[in-house]
Structures are given as C-alpha cells and as structure tokens.
Image: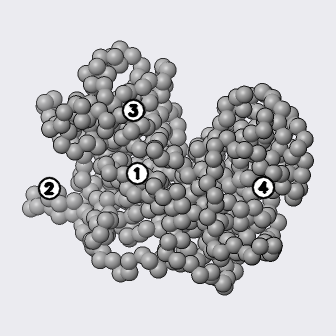
C-alpha cells in the first residue's frame, strides 16, 4: 500500500519525541490533503513519525500530516513504554556508540538540563499564523525572524524562508511579527545564559576520529540518535544524521542531555585545536590606477596565502559541501562533497570536478555603438571596511567602490542550511555607461580535456545528468546534458522556457547531490537559463542569471532611462542555492 507516497523529507527540524504507550492500537491518520489510512503508532523521533502497517514500519515526516494527526502523535509520544520494532522497510546498520556502553544490566539516568519555560515550549514559535498584506491578501506561514524591516517566514514542513518587507503587511500582521520577534529575543537571552553555564561543563575524553564518526547523541527526554558533529553556535548544535544524511540539521542546545551538550562542547574545542594555527594571511590591497585614472589592478580582500583556501576570504566547511568567497569580493565557489565510503564515517571527500560558482555581476557596455563587442564586468577599485578572513562567519557583507566611482553592497548568507545572495549598486544618473546588477549561478565544464575524448568515453561520465527547469509560464522541462545545445535551443525557440522560477541539477555529474537554485520571489524579477560561453553540450557549462525585470530589459534594449530599477536585488528577492545529498552510490 502506498503510505502517503512514503514521503521522506529532504530536510527536517529536529525535535526529540518519546515512544508511545498505545502503539498496538490502530489509529486513523489523515494527511494535509484529507486522505486517511489506518495504522498503529510506533514512535515519534525528531520530525519523523513512524507508523506500522501490515507488519512493516514506515517513517514519515510529521508535517505531512494534518494538525489533528500531529497532535495525536504527540499525545501518544507522551508515554514511555517502547514498542518492539517491526522489520524495517530497509535494513538499518547497527549503531556505533560514542563511548563504551555501560555494563550489562546497568542503566544511567539521563541528566536533564534545568531550563526556563521559554526554552521548553516552542508551540508559539512553531504555530502557523495568518499574515495579511496591505491589500488584504492572506498567507499562512510560520514565523522565522524579523530582520530590520523584513519579515522572514516559512511554510509548514519546509526550511526554505520567504522574506516580506514590513511595508507590504497590514498593521495587525506587523504587530504580530514584532510580538513574535520579542519572544525570539527572550529565547536568545535564555540561550545565552545557558551558553555561559556550558563553559564550566566537564569535557569527555575525545579523539580526532570522533570528529568524523557517527556518534550517539541523547536528547533531554532520553531518546538517542546517531549523528556526526558538524559545528556549534550559541543557539544550536549542527549535526549530520546517519539515518538522513542529506543535509545537516540544527538541534537547540536545550534539546540535548547534559552529557551530549558536554560532548558537543568537547568536539567544538577539538575541532578548533586541530585547526592549523597562525595561518599566513594577506593584507587588504586597494586597487591601483594609472596616470589617466584608469584602474590597472582590482582591490583584494584579506585572504589566506597557503593551503587549500589560498586566495579566499570567507570559508565554510560543511558536511555536504564547502563554500568560499574569493578575495575579489565578487565570486563564490561551491565544492560538492561525496558521502564517505566508510558507513561509520560522516567525512566525505570533495567530488573530483570543478566547483560550482555564484558571481555578483556589474555589467556595462563600454562600446554601445559597436554591437560586435560584448559587455564588461566592472572591477572593484576599493573595499570599505573589508571583512577579515574567517571560517566562522555566516553572513558576509562586502561594500566598496567600483571602477566608475559607483558604490556597491554584496550580501551573502552562507551556512550549513543553504546559501543566499542579494545586493545593490548606487550609481550617478549621469553615468555615461550605465550598469546593471545581476547574480549568476554557473555549472562549469566538469570533464577536463573533453575535446580530446571520444564520445564513448564521455557518455559514462555524463550518465544521467540533467537540469530540470520550472518555467513561469509552462510545464517543467528536462535538459539532458548529453543533448546538443543546438537541439535544445531549437526546441525552446518560440516557447516560454524563460524566465523560470527554479532550476535543479542532478544525476551522475553531481554524484548523489541535488542542487536547487531559486529566487525567494519572482515578483518583478527575471531568472533565466542559458548555455555557457562555449561548448557543444550542457555539461560543458550552464548559466543561470538572476536580476530585476528592468535590468533584463535595460540590457536587452539599451534604454536605461526607461528601466531604472536595475541596480538592486533586495533580500526579499534574493537568489537561493540549496544543496542536499542522498546516501551515495
């Protein structure tokens, strides 16, 4: 039987549950579309509700169920009597303990942290609210955060955020956002107090290999999962679950037992200890101009001078990918990381292919009367308050001056949860060669020396590589990476394949990864796809370009007076890159 299509989420918010007392009883379970099935409750673990049908267990994401069924699951999870496990749908490897197990017959009680109420009840912040716009349109979503004059929300069952300027919301919705923000601030304050207390915890004995292994973690309620350590912040511990290793998840500190909190503290300190000390760093360099005032060399951010991060400023090393901002302040590289061949290790190796890239592009036409020449990308003349080298920073803002005197601000949010990019340029209206701002995503040629290879040798490397396009005005299209660009363009001619609302890359060239690129909003925005600068096939290069409609039209027509909104991609219209990884091949 199809159990709600056996949907297993690619991302989850981890909230520990407990085993159910009445698991042998058959219950009616209803999904969000009103469909109902009969099954017994087994357990609620994280956001996975496991139900039993026909003697088999099915783990399903809790958000897939109706609010009534979710409440039923939580009620059944409030008891403590476990149910004997039924044969799983697929074999589950034996857990590897984080430390020697206790002697037979012994049991160690879980040390629960003493928590204020604001850290034990998330019902207010996890509830779905009605948000209304000034023109009385309605949206139902969960509050995420209030960032200056922007509200960040997410739909139920999703981690992807949408940003709405407060100016577009009704007074009632603005008041609600501020009220919930106040609760978040109180929660952060309480978490800060807990962080101070953790400074005095006793750190267990750990080895360098523990940073790579799947370890046992215990919740404040006594449940155990297998997960690998990724990182910590003041508010949460980031781990990669062995059962669902598609992307890291964050577990609030207060949801962990004191023992697991001390293990997380120890792993973080061990990670810092093993980081090479005193790396050679290059200083900030301002751009240089010649005697005529033309920029000869671009400005350079502080950067690493040695090792694999040479010439990069900001770095994130995650479980599924590595990301780094170039010292030019405009280019970001993304390296995919394969799953480990060792089932007990979470540390994979970089995929042997050129990295994906995101670029901030400030295009201008230096020869508008000569249509045989192309557009150029402005260079950075200087950086204002250049960001220092870091491997800890999530949000990086780069500001400065371009070669024509225009100022810019490039923003990037780079974390284990995903990547997002937005920015703006301020330019004088009298500029002789006006600029347009765009943010591009590039999948480069991943087969070296392909021009010297026979087709029979290329085909296995490309395999089932595809790019899925979701056009705004037509149905989903599949671009096979072994189909010639000429055939693709002929098929797309006269259709509505551009602009698009998202693109997804998957298949052999990307290992077990799925890379989804999407704008947070398509309103007055224009996301397009195109072939690379050269190449016969899509695997040799694919461009996605994100910009405003005015930026697209200004570049297409050359009418910069008519299309003025071409220099800002707001946070509410940011470009998002989300990468998940399967279990490997």
Q: Earlier in the sequence, mark 2 or mark 4?
A: 4
When asked about the image quadrant of residue 264, the answer is bottom right
Residue 162 or 4: which is nearer the viewer?
4
Dot 2: element: loop
Disc 4 packing (10 Å; few <14; some 14–19; many ≥20):
many
**Residue 520: % across, % down:** 52, 40
Residue at which label 2 appears = 294
Q: Nearer the viewer, mark 3 or mark 4?
A: 3
Residue at the extreme top: 494
Q: CA distance from mark 3 to mark 4?
A: 39 Å
Disc 2 packing (10 Å; few <14; some 14–19; many ≥20):
few
Q: Earlier in the sequence, mark 1 or mark 2?
A: 2
Residue at which label 3 appears = 464
Dot 4: element: loop
Residue at which label 1 appears = 336
Residue 53 or 544: which is nearer the viewer?
53
In this view of the protein, can residue 540 be seen by the observer? yes
Q: Nearer the viewer, mark 2 or mark 4?
A: 4
Q: Does residue 16 lie above or below 430 as drawn?
A: below
Residue at which label 4 appears = 17
Q: CA distance from mark 1 to mark 4?
A: 32 Å
When asked about the image quadrant of residue 242, the answer is bottom right
What residue sits 17% from the left and 64% below the top?
288
Q: CA distance from mark 3 to mark 2?
A: 48 Å
């Amino acid at each position: 039987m199809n159990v709600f299509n056996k949907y297993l989420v690619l991302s989850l918010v981890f909230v520990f549950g407990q085993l159910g007392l009445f698991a042998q009883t058959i219950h009616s379970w209803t999904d969000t579309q009103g469909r109902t099935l009969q099954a017994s409750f087994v357990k609620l673990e994280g956001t996975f509700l496991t139900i039993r049908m026909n003697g088999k267990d099915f783990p399903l994401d809790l958000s897939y169920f109706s609010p009534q069924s979710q409440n039923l699951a939580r009620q059944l999870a409030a008891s403590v009597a476990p149910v004997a496990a039924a044969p799983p749908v697929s074999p589950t490897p034996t857990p590897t303990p984080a430390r020697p197990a206790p002697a037979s017959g012994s049991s160690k009680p879980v040390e629960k942290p003493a928590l204020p109420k604001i850290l034990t009840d998330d019902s207010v912040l996890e509830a779905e609210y009605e948000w209304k716009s000034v023109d009385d349109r309605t949206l139902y979503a969960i509050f995420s955060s209030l960032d200056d004059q922007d509200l960040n929300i997410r739909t139920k069952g999703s981690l992807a955020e949408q940003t709405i300027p407060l100016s577009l919301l009704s007074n009632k919705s603005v008041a609600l956002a501020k009220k919930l923000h106040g609760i978040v601030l109180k929660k952060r304050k309480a978490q800060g107090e807990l962080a101070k207390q953790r400074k005095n915890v006793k750190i267990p004995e750990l080895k360098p290999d523990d940073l790579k292994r799947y370890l046992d973690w215990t919740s404040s309620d006594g449940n155990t999962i297998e997960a690998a350590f990724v990182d910590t912040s003041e508010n949460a511990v980031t781990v990669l679950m062995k059962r669902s290793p598609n992307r890291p998840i964050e577990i609030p500190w207060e949801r962990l037992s004191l023992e697991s909190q001390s293990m997380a503290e120890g792993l973080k300190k061990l990670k810092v200890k093993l980081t090479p000390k005193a790396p050679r760093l290059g200083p900030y360099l301002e751009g240089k101009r010649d005697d005529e005032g033309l920029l000869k060399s671009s400005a350079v951010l502080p950067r690493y001078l040695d090792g694999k991060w040479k010439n990069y400023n900001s770095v994130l090393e995650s479980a599924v990918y590595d990301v780094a901002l170039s010292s030019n302040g405009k280019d970001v590289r993304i390296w995919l990381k394969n799953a480990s061949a060792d089932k007990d290790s979470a540390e994979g190796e970089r995929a042997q292919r050129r990295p994906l890239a995101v670029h901030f592009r400030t295009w201008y036409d230096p020869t508008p009367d000569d249509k045989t020449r192309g557009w150029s990308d402005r260079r950075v003349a200087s950086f204002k308050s250049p960001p220092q080298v870091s491997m800890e920073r999530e949000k990086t803002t780069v500001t400065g001056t371009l070669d024509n005197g225009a100022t810019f601000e490039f923003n990037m949010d780079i974390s284990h949860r995903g990547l997002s990019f937005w920015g703006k340029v301020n330019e004088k209206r009298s500029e002789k060669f006006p600029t347009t701002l765009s943010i591009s995503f590039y999948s480069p040629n991943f087969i070296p020396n392909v021009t010297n290879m026979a087709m029979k040798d290329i085909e296995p490397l490309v395999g089932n590589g595809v790019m899925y396009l979701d056009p705004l005005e037509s149905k989903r299209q599949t671009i096979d990476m072994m189909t010639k660009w000429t055939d693709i363009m002929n098929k797309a001619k006269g259709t509505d394949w551009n602009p698009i609302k998202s693109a997804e890359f998957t298949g052999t060239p990307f290992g077990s990864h799925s890379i989804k690129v999407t704008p947070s909003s398509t309103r007055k925005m224009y996301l397009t796809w195109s072939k690379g600068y050269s190449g016969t096939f899509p695997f040799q290069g694919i461009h996605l370009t994100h910009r405003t409609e005015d930026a697209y039209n200004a570049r297409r027509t050359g009418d910069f007076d008519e299309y003025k909104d071409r220099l800002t991609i707001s946070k509410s219209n940011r470009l998002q890159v989300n990468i998940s990884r399967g279990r490997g091949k």
